[in-house]
Amino acid sequence: MIPLPTLRRLGLLCALTVTGTVLPAGPAHAAPPAPALRFGPCPQSVPTPPAPERVECGRLSVPLDRSRPHGIRIDIAVSRVRASGPASERRGVLLVNPGGPGGPGLGYAVTKRAKLPERVRRSYDVIGFDPRGTGASAPADCGRMGGLFDGPGRDPVPVGRTAERRYLDDLRRIANDCARGVGDALPFLSTTETARDMDAIRAALDEPRIAFLGVSYGTYLGAAYAARFPQRVGRLVLDSVVGPWEWYDFDLRQSRALLRQRAVFFSWVARHQERFGLGARAASVRAAYQRVRHGLGRSPVNGFGAAEFDRTVYRALGRTERWTGLADGLRAYLRDGSVGPLRPAEPFDGAAARTYEAANRTVKCADGRAPDPARIVADLRRLRRSDLRPVLTGMEASVCAYWHHRPAHRTPLGSPAAPPALLIASAHDPVTPLAGARALRHRLPGSRLVTLHHDYSHGVFASRGNDCVDEAAAAYLVDGTVPGTDVDCRGPGLPTP
């Protein structure tokens, strides 16, 4: 039974030229009818699209536990911006997800839609939603999360056996706090259940199939939907692909990719010595970086220490347009001890961040098998042998070693019965490395991979402004054109500061 405080928190007391295959626009099998989803005004947090378009919002009631359909129910927050073209151009609905796990998507229907190619906007009603456990859809609450939000936080890279024991103790405390806060809902805030919610949205909209655009974790969610409902998938665009591995294994791959990306960053800064003044060699920039991190670890500035610094670095490494700001922040600290340029615009301990971090761990730990604590320590030592101060910010699934609910199997991804998908990847994305897209495509036979070469950022379609990528994706979504072969596009290379 879910404790009363948890029920209140969950909101449960209220009730290029390409040739190839062309996908059919119509359904393979019609689904049974479902009650309509009623839309009305949106919360103020949802941005307003430019006139004459408008966004509308609604709530869909679904079971928390689908094995008990008459038990506790939760509300899923849904948004919609209708297609701007005439009915003759309409292709149906395009559900969108921004990533995470833990990222809300209610406003994403507006912000992502604004960047989509015009003919996609004309063809699809864009549907956003807050996945269960996020935003306004039964938000997860893990309380203090073992002190994760304390500032300054403990140095996230343990050095020595005593620090390693503290590191594991912190993971145990996070797991305990989530068990207390989320309670009996722990097993049901999962990717599989969110995929079922997506199908409930499809049915409520009276659509036989859905098209889906998922970015980052959204690719994992889309692959999970294809695994469970292959006949209800229309056109599936998976951008910046999470590989089909256990979450802990994915996190470990990401941490290694971040080290490679950080080395590229050091070399880039060195090439622009006149602009940044941090040294003309990569080794000199690395040394400057280490001085900043060591200094903040020893003497945090206004609650900003090594843990906060690593979070800033993690965020910056994933998007090259943030590299100039990171380099300027390093220089500012070394010049006068200022950390202003290194602080994120959004506070880490705000309500949205707390929900995100809670949902992130809850979903990852509900999705598959957990690592063993001994393996976690062994992997930390291996990472430190490759670099004394690796970036461990993305290693969220380590907490699953102490989780209070242990799923027996990992989330199924992909299906040979689903139609071919379009996978999109940046060649040097450190957040979702290219190997993930190559691995997942084998779970979706007939799918094609669009690779943006000479690019080092996370998020590609309708994000990087690359005509080659955007045209391939638009042709797939609107016309159903699956490229005859994989598509190679040329990216912008490294930025000019």
Image (cartoon, helix red, strand yellow):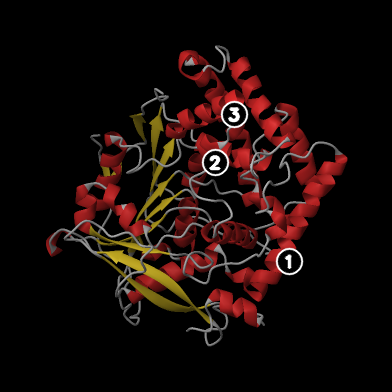
Q: Amino acid at mark 2?
A: Arg
Quarter of the image with the C terminus in it:
top left
> Viewer-nearest of labels 1 and 2?
2
Give the spatial CA distance, label 3 vs label 1: 42 Å
Q: Quadrant of residue 144?
A: bottom right
> Who is closer to the viewer here, 263 or 191?
263
Q: Position of residue 487 (x, y in %)?
A: 34, 34
Q: Is residue 296 left or right of residue 60?
A: right
Q: Is residue 6 left or right of residue 450?
A: right
Label 3 packing within 10 angstroms: few (<14), some (14-19), many (20+) = some
Residue at image mark 2:
343
Label 2 packing within 10 angstroms: few (<14), some (14-19), many (20+) = some
> Viewer-nearest of labels 3 and 1?
3
Q: Is residue 481 visible?
A: no
Q: Secondary structure at mark 1?
A: loop
Q: Earlier in the sequence, mark 3 or mark 2?
A: 3
Q: Is residue 268 left or right of residue 203?
A: right
The furthest residue to the front:
336
Residue at image mark 3:
333
Quarter of the image with the N terminus in it:
bottom right
Is there a contact, CB below 8 Å, between mark 3 and mark 1? no
Q: Is residue 32 above or below residue 122?
A: below
For the point 20% across and 49% down, which residue is it? 118
The furthest residue to the bottom:
70
Residue at image mark 1:
404
Q: Secondary structure at mark 3?
A: helix
Give the spatial CA distance, label 3 vs label 2: 12 Å
For the point 55% across and 24% down, which residue is it? 331
Q: Is residue 66 visible?
A: yes
Number of marks in the image?
A: 3
Q: Earlier in the sequence, mark 3 or mark 1?
A: 3
